[in-house]
Amino acid sequence: MSLLHPVDGPPLLTDQAVAMLRRDILTTRLGPGETVSESATAQRLGLGKAPVRAALARLAEEGLVVSVPRRGWVVSLVTIRDIHEVFDLRLLLEPEAARRAAGRVDGAALARLDAVCAAGYRPEDEESALAFLDANRAFHVAIADLSRNLRLTRMIGRLLDESTRMLVLGLRRRDRTGEMAHEHAALVKALAEGRAAEAAALMHDQVAASRDMVLAALTAPDAAIAV
């Protein structure tokens, strides 16, 4: 047994388990409130219980799972407060990133990413859904990266990860991917032409529209949400 990792198991296996479980949670393969069995998860992922246990502990630090007495690990609920806090920060940071990115953008590269988003989110096709979410995140991170502030890019990337699960739950009730594709196209044009104020305003409107869609969907009576 390694003295450096006496409990967690091989770090690469733990990292692998973290990545797979985080994706399962963010895409709601593991839904809010669902119990996560260490032994069943280890078998499903083809890993040992030690790296799975260590991965769940790390995901608990991120707030994605919680330890509940006599139930073990449970996927955390999405709360109204979560939605407001995540989108409030996105509304503060992403318009500024877009303003700074204007005139620096490779419009062709962003357009290629946007084309993937435009393919739409099909809940019955898990792979297309994951491709859409990955492309949407990449689109927003690419704009943040053009702000040339690494900390800003990292913060936006983390917020996008947190909002992914909210978007999945919201899009299942209302598919606004067509609207998102139109919004992205307008934003790419403003960025490529260096219209900073317009790019910031468009980004603000896009993030606000996503927040409103999520709030409307997840406050429905049968939604998996906590106040």
Image (cartoon, rainbow, N blue to C red):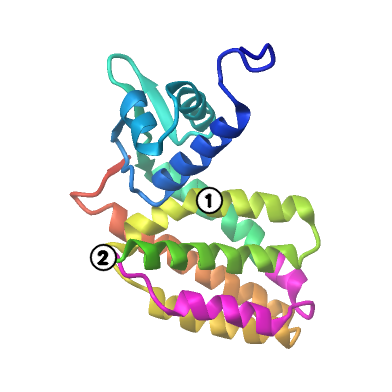
The C terminus - image quarter: top left
Image position of 143 with respect to 40: above or below? below
Residue at 58 percent of width and 60 percent of height: 91
Principal secondary structure, stretch drawn in magenta: helix
- 168 part of magenta stretch: no
Residue at 65 percent of width and 14 percent of height: 2
Q: Mark 2 points at which residue?
A: 124
Task: Please state the horizontal and vertical placement of residue 173, each as a whole percent of the image.
Answer: 26, 63
Q: Name the residue under label 1.
A: 161
Task: Please state the horizontal and vertical placement of residue 143, each as a whole percent of the image.
Answer: 68, 68
Question: In the figure, is residue 181 to the left or right of 34?
Answer: right
Would residue 96 be visible to someone looking at this image?
Answer: no
Mark sitting earlier along the chain (1/2):
2
Residue 30, numbered label: none
Q: Which image quadrant for residue 112? A: bottom right
Q: For the residue marked with disc 2, what is the amino acid? A: Glu
Comparing 137 with 214, the one in front is 137
Q: Which image quadrant for residue 97? A: bottom right
Q: For the residue marked with disc 1, what is the amino acid? A: Asp
Would residue 217 be visible to someone looking at this image?
Answer: yes
Comparing 50 with 172, the one in front is 50
Q: Give the range drawn in magenta.
A: 97-123
Task: Please state the horizontal and vertical placement of residue 7, each as a whole percent of the image.
Answer: 56, 14
